[in-house]
Image (cartoon, rainbow, N blue to C red):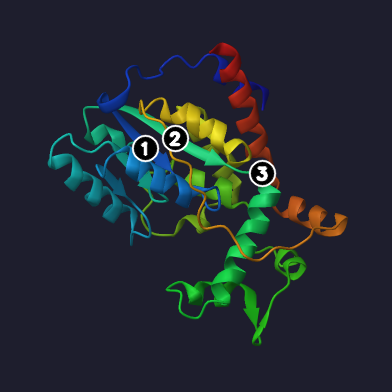
Amino acid sequence: MRKWFQALRTKTDKPAGKGTDRLFLFVHLPKCAGTSLLKMFARASEGRCVTLAETPSKSAAWEIVKSAASGGEETRVIMGRDVIYGMHRLFSKKPYYITFLRDPVQRYVSQYNFYVDLANQPGHPAHHVGVERVVEAGKLVSLPDFARRGSDQNMLTRALADANDPERQRDPWWHVDPGTALARASDLLARMDFVGLVETFEADCSRLFREFEIQPAFERVNTSRHQVELNDELLATIRENNRLDLDLYSRALQLIQARSVSE
């Protein structure tokens, strides 16, 4: 941890310039205000954006970005869960990588609530996902049972590690090897030009969108209708199952603090 943190203080390869001479690349992590940010980025780029979500493979995501690059330099933003570090090399613009993280316990609860919302909406196109994740024998699985079976653990770490592996083609990101995930995720975190937090969403968005040279219009969307309370036992279970995410989040806090001091 100490060696990694020292590296944050010596990072000097920050891109220069603002506005249209930059290519903004937003790595969307699950349940980290991504839907709100995607809408804001789309408006900020005036539609000159490429969204990578639910692409069938990494090779397909690369082909989409290659097609955008071949059409000229109009693209301002590449965003979504399938953004991969290195995609900026297809463009001549200076890259500016962005991600947002969230307190891992709150993120985990939000993930569960999201699944419950999907399961309760038969008309939703992703209804089946909610049913698969939180319905057993026709009944909703409680959050304690969901946590005890280790469902969807360390999703922040695995998703960010996946974005730092441009060559891997076959398995989806949730199959990332947990033995290497934290090191790969931490490496990419340190390369990010901007790291924001859901907990300081509006302040971070205001700071971020100064890079676009516009004033953001805040809009929180995709918020859950389902709410649960946490007791000490459940909190301990969630923490135990998401130790990698807690470590990554701690590193993000250190990074943000280190960069705020140097600004």
Residue at point 60% right, 61% down?
Answer: 224
The residue at which mark 1 appears reads as 25
Tell me the tag on residue 98.
2
Dot 1: few (<14), some (14–19), or many (≥20) neighbours within 10 Å?
Answer: many
Residue extending farthest to the left is 71
Residue 28: tell me if it is visible. no
Relative to 123, is 96 above or below? above
Relative to 81, is 195 above or below? above
Mark 2 or mark 3, earlier in chain: 2
Q: Where, by quadrant of the figure, is residue 5 drawn? A: top right
Residue 190: tell me if it is visible. yes
Q: Is residue 68 left or right of residue 258?
A: left
- Do labels 2 and 3 touch, CB within 8 Å? no
Q: Where, by quadrant of the figure, is residue 200 drawn? A: top right
Q: Secondary structure at mark 3?
A: loop
Q: Amino acid at mark 2?
A: Ile
Tell me the tag on residue 148.
none
Question: x, y (%) of residue 206?
Answer: 49, 30
Question: x, y (%) of residue 260?
Answer: 58, 18
The residue at which mark 3 appears reads as 103
- Which of 89 and 234 lies nearest the eye of the viewer? 234
Residue at point 27% right, 36% down?
Answer: 76
Q: Disc 2 and disc 3: Cα gap in Å?
A: 17 Å
Q: Amino acid at mark 1?
A: Leu
Q: Is residue 238 left or right of residue 112?
A: right
Residue at point 59% right, 26% down?
Answer: 256
- Do labels 2 and 1 touch, CB within 8 Å? yes
Question: x, y (%) of residue 205?
Answer: 49, 34
